[in-house]
Image (cartoon, rainbow, N blue to C red):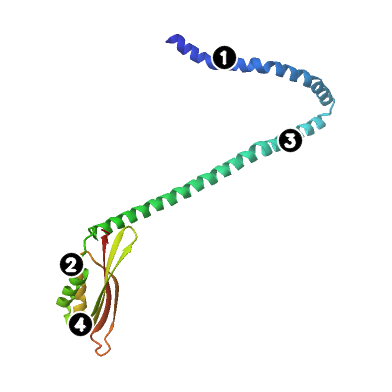
Amino acid sequence: MRSSLRQIALRPSAAIARVKSFCEPHLVRARATIAPYWEVVADWYDKREPREKWLLHVLGGLLVTLFAYDCIYLPANEWRNDLAERVTARQHQVIRLRAMMRNFERLRLELASVQQRTIPGGKDPGLFSVLQVTLANSVGRTKIGSITPNTRQVAGGLQQYTVDVKLNDVGLAQIVDTLYSLQSLSVPITISNFQMRQHARDSHTFDVDLTCMALGKAG
């Protein structure tokens, strides 16, 4: 066990040694190539006056600064800005995703609510007859102008049952009683349209147009 750990610890040193042995011949050749030019430059520098040497130092510092600015600072700053833009884009994506999740949850709850108020498949709710009896009890048959049933297929494999009702010359208390009676029916209906206007011959009564709707699963 101890020998295995020792071998693992020596692996980086062995890798460094291999890299060094590979690069050493190239470094030797590079030094041999550069050495004559370096001696010429060093000899030229030694012959300069102190003021000239100081100016050379300043120039060298400026060159190093420009090199660092162009080759290190600008690429690093560009990389940082690009990273910040990508982080901002990801944050916007997360915000949109959360909004979509909230919207999905809202739609899921609405769908569950609709399904709870959906008539079982293949079962006719008898909406026409139910409304006829209910309205006769709340406003009287003479106040019922018309009751028009309609059935059609809608999206999601559902059957939509609607009944358009016209009531004539009914009082406000009768309208409230009618709406309460419709909401209390055993058949899960929704009032999709409701309009009331003053009766032509009596300002204390109203004419009412309403549409009752029920959804059922297609049989």
Spatial CA distance of label 2 from label 3 is: 90 Å
Residue 180 is at least partly visible in this image: no
Q: Secondary structure at mark 2?
A: loop
Amino acid carrying label 4: it is Lys
Q: Earlier in the sequence, mark 1 or mark 2?
A: 1
Distance between the alpha carbons at the discs numbered 1 and 3: 38 Å
| Residue 83: image location, x then y, percent | 55, 42
The type of residue carrying mark 3 is Leu
Q: CA distance from mark 1 to mark 2?
A: 88 Å
Q: Secondary structure at mark 4?
A: helix
Residue 184, image quadrant: bottom left
Say what secondary structure mark 3 lies in.
Answer: helix
Give the residue drawn at x 36%, y 53%. Answer: 104
Q: Can you identify the residue that label 3 sits on?
A: 63
Task: Give whichever of discs 1 and 4 has the lower sequence position.
Answer: 1
Question: To which residue does mark 4 refer?
Answer: 143
199 relative to 185, above or below: below
The mark lying in front, picked from 1 and 3, is 1
**Relative to 189, 69 lies left or right:** right
Q: Position of residue 135 (x, y in %)?
A: 18, 76
In the shown orientation, is residue 91 left or right of residue 188?
right
> Residue placed farthest to the left in the image?
137
Amino acid type at circle 1 is: Ala
Residue bearing mark 1? 14
Point out the frontmost of discs 3 and 4: 4
Reading the image, the residue beneath label 2 is: 185
Which mark sits nearer the N-terminus, 4 or 2? Answer: 4
Q: Is residue 18 visible?
A: yes
Q: In the structure shown, which secondary structural element does the residue marked by tag 1 occupy?
A: helix
